[in-house]
C-alpha cells in the first residue's frame, strides 16, 4: 500500500513538473527578446541624438536683439518644404545667375508708333461728334479729318480721324468710350526702332560726305570739269540728305502723335420711318422703271411716226395710181 501511494505521488509530481519547466523556458525566451529590443532602442536613440546634435551645430544661436540682421540664407531655409535637404532648399531659394542678369526691357527707349480704331454706336451723331471734338481739344489732340455717310438722305455714320499725343492716348481712348456702345476697338503698335536707328546712321554718313565734298570745293583747285562734277555730286548728296531728314521728321511726328480713327454709328432699333423708308424707296424705284418704260415707248413712237406717215402716203399714192390704171383698162 505504501508502494502504491509512493508510485501515485511520483506520477503526480512528474505530471506537474512538465508545465513548470515549459513556463520557465518561455520566460527565459521573453526576457531575451526584451533585452534585444531594449538594445536596438538604445542604438536608435543614440543615432537620433547624434543627428540632432549635428543639425543643432549648423544653426546659429537665437538672438534677442530685434535689430540684429537676419542671415539671407535663413529665410529660404525656413521656407523650404519638409523633406527637402538644405542644399536643395538653397538651390531653390537662391536666384540663378541667369535670373540675376535678366533685366526687363526698357520700353521708353523703343520707338513705338501706336494707332487705334474705335467703332461706337450713339443715339445722336451730331452731338457725339461735338463731344468727341471737345475731348480732342481737352487732351491736346487734333481733328485731322471728318466725314459723314448718308443712306436714303439720312446721315447714319460719322468718321473722325484724331491725332492724339502719344502720352495722352490712354486718356483719350477712355474718354471716347463713354460716347456710347463700343462695338469694335483695336489698338496696334509698330516698332520702328531699327528703322529709326538705320536712318540716323545713314544721315550721319551722308552729312560726312557732304562735308568732305564742300571741303574739297573750298580747299582744292582743279579743272573746270572736275569742279562741275564735284558740285553735281554735292547737290545730289544734299538732296538725299534732306530727303532722309524729312523721313526722320515724319517718324518723329508719328512717334509724338498717335492716330485714332473713330467711327460713330447711329444706334437704336428700327423706327417707323426706317420701316417705311425701304418700302417708299422700292416704290420709287418701281415708278422710275415704269417711267423709263413709258419713255422708251414714246421714243419708239416718235421715231416711227414720221416714217409711218411717209409710208402711208406712199401707199395711198400707189393705191390711187393702181385704181386709175384699172379704170383705164376697163374703158
Image (cartoon, rainbow, N blue to C red):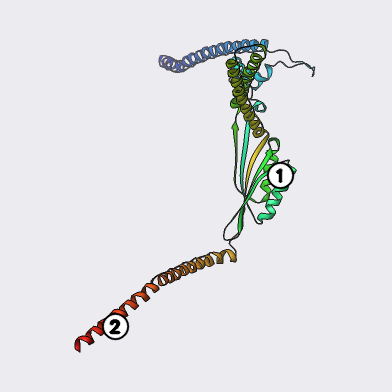
The residue beneath circle 2 is 320
Residue 294 or 79: which is nearer the viewer?
294
Residue 293 or 53: which is nearer the viewer?
293
Question: Would you say 315 lies left or right of 330 here?
Answer: right
Q: Which mark is in front, 2 or 1?
A: 2
Quadrant that contains the N terminus: top left
Residue at position x 53%, y 12% in the image? 36
Residue 140 in the image: x percent, y percent? 73, 40
Residue at position x 40%, y 70% in the image? 303
The residue beneath circle 1 is 136
Quadrant that contains the C terminus: bottom left
Q: Secondary structure at mark 1?
A: helix
Determine the image quadrant of residue 202: top right
Question: Would you say 306 lies left or right of 169 here?
Answer: left
Residue 84 in the image: x percent, y percent? 58, 19
Check the image and report above or below for 121 versus 170.
below
Residue 19 in the image: x percent, y percent? 46, 18
Amino acid at each position: 500500500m505504501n508502494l502504491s501511494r509512493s508510485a501515485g505521488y511520483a506520477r503526480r509530481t512528474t505530471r506537474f513538473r512538465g508545465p513548470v519547466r515549459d513556463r520557465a523556458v518561455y520566460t527565459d525566451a521573453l526576457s531575451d527578446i526584451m533585452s534585444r529590443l531594449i538594445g536596438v532602442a538604445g542604438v536608435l536613440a543614440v543615432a537620433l541624438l547624434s543627428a540632432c546634435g549635428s543639425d543643432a551645430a549648423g544653426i546659429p544661436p537665437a538672438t534677442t536683439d530685434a535689430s540684429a540682421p537676419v542671415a539671407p540664407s535663413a529665410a529660404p531655409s525656413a521656407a523650404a518644404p519638409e523633406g527637402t535637404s538644405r542644399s536643395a532648399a538653397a538651390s531653390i531659394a537662391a536666384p540663378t545667375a541667369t535670373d540675376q542678369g535678366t533685366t526687363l526691357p526698357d520700353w521708353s527707349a523703343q520707338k513705338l508708333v501706336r494707332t487705334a480704331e474705335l467703332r461706337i454706336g450713339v443715339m445722336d451723331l451730331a452731338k457725339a461728334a461735338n463731344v468727341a471734338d471737345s475731348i480732342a481739344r481737352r487732351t491736346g489732340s487734333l481733328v485731322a479729318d471728318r466725314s459723314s455717310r448718308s443712306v436714303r438722305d439720312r446721315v447714319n455714320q460719322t468718321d473722325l480721324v484724331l491725332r492724339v499725343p502719344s502720352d495722352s492716348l490712354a486718356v483719350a481712348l477712355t474718354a471716347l468710350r463713354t460716347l456710347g456702345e463700343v462695338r469694335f476697338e483695336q489698338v496696334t503698335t509698330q516698332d520702328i526702332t531699327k528703322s529709326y536707328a538705320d536712318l540716323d546712321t545713314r544721315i550721319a554718313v551722308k552729312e560726312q560726305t557732304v562735308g568732305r565734298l564742300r571741303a574739297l570745293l573750298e580747299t582744292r583747285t582743279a579743272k573746270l570739269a572736275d569742279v562741275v562734277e564735284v558740285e553735281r555730286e554735292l547737290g545730289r548728296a544734299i538732296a538725299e540728305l534732306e530727303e532722309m531728314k524729312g523721313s526722320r521728321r515724319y517718324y518723329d511726328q508719328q512717334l509724338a502723335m498717335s492716330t485714332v480713327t473713330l467711327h460713330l454709328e447711329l444706334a437704336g432699333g428700327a423706327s417707323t420711318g426706317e420701316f417705311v423708308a425701304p418700302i417708299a424707296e422700292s416704290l420709287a424705284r418701281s415708278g422710275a422703271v415704269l417711267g423709263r418704260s413709258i419713255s422708251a415707248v414714246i421714243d419708239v413712237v416718235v421715231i416711227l411716226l414720221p416714217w409711218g406717215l411717209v409710208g402711208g402716203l406712199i401707199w395711198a399714192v400707189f393705191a390711187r395710181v393702181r385704181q386709175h390704171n384699172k379704170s383705164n383698162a376697163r374703158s
